[in-house]
Image (cartoon, rainbow, N blue to C red):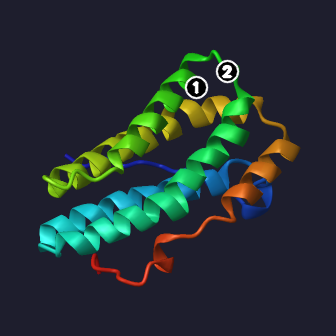
């Protein structure tokens, strides 16, 4: 049996769309954080020396992640009421993730796995549930400020030991 799908013809000049400021930079930073999680998984899979991964995790936490969380709390989270259930959940998860970055010296591999798993889940929660709410409540002026703040952060490529490659 053969199925045929007919697509409507569209003249490119008929396409109208407007470009507006949105949470692009925040989304990009979340994707870069997902790469951080992927880098940990890749390091574990490749059997990379645990101290190299711990050094990276500590650097990432101090230089990127905790600063990203501060920006979220100062700028993004204020787009919703402080008693909003999503804000309460996100703040709780931020506290938990920060505690996870205190690597257990007796079982550092367990710490790395928890960081990777919890952070991955948290990022997906923010993107799927919180970002749509932020977008509804943000003005163009606020979004521009938020994007500028996120744009000041370092990235994974600023780390010199890219063991995941």
Report the front residue among 29 and 63: 63
Residue under the image location 69 percent in, 63 percent down: 151
Q: Residue at x 59, y 54 (%)?
A: 67
| Mark 2 → mark 1, Cα distance in angstroms | 6 Å
Q: Provide the secondary structure element on which disc 2 rests.
A: loop
Q: Which residue is mark 1?
A: 87
Q: Is residue 52 left or right of residue 126?
A: left
Give residue 17's position: percent from left, percent from top.
Answer: 78, 51
Residue 140 found in image quarter: top right
On the question of residue 27 being in view, the answer is: no
Q: On the rendered image, what quadrant is the C terminus found in?
A: bottom left
Mark sitting earlier along the chain (2/1): 2
The furthest residue to the bottom: 160
Q: Is residue 55 left or right of residue 138?
A: left
Pointer 2: what residue? 82
Counting from the top left corner in percent of width and height, residue 115 is at: 31, 49
Asked if the residue under mark 1 is in contact with the one under mark 2, i.e. CB atoms within 8 Å, the reply is: yes
Q: Which mark is residue 99?
A: none
Label 1: few (<14), some (14–19) or many (≥20) C-alpha neighbours in 10 Å: many
Q: Residue furthest front?
A: 105
């Amino acid at each position: 049996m053969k199925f045929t799908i007919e697509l409507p013809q569209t003249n490119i000049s008929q396409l109208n769309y407007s470009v507006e400021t949105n949470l692009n930079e925040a989304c990009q930073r979340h994707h870069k954080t997902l790469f951080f999680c992927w880098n940990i998984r890749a390091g574990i899979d490749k059997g990379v020396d645990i101290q190299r991964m711990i050094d990276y995790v500590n650097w990432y936490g101090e230089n990127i992640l905790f600063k990203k969380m501060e920006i979220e709390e100062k700028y993004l989270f204020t787009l919703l009421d402080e008693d909003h259930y999503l804000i309460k959940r996100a703040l709780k998860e931020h506290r938990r993730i920060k505690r996870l970055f205190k690597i257990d010296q007796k079982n550092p591999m367990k710490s790395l796995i928890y960081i990777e798993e919890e952070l991955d889940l948290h990022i997906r929660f923010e993107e799927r549930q919180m970002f749509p709410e932020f977008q509804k409540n943000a003005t163009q002026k606020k979004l521009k400020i938020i994007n500028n703040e996120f744009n000041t952060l370092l990235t994974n490529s600023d780390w010199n030991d890219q063991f995941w490659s």
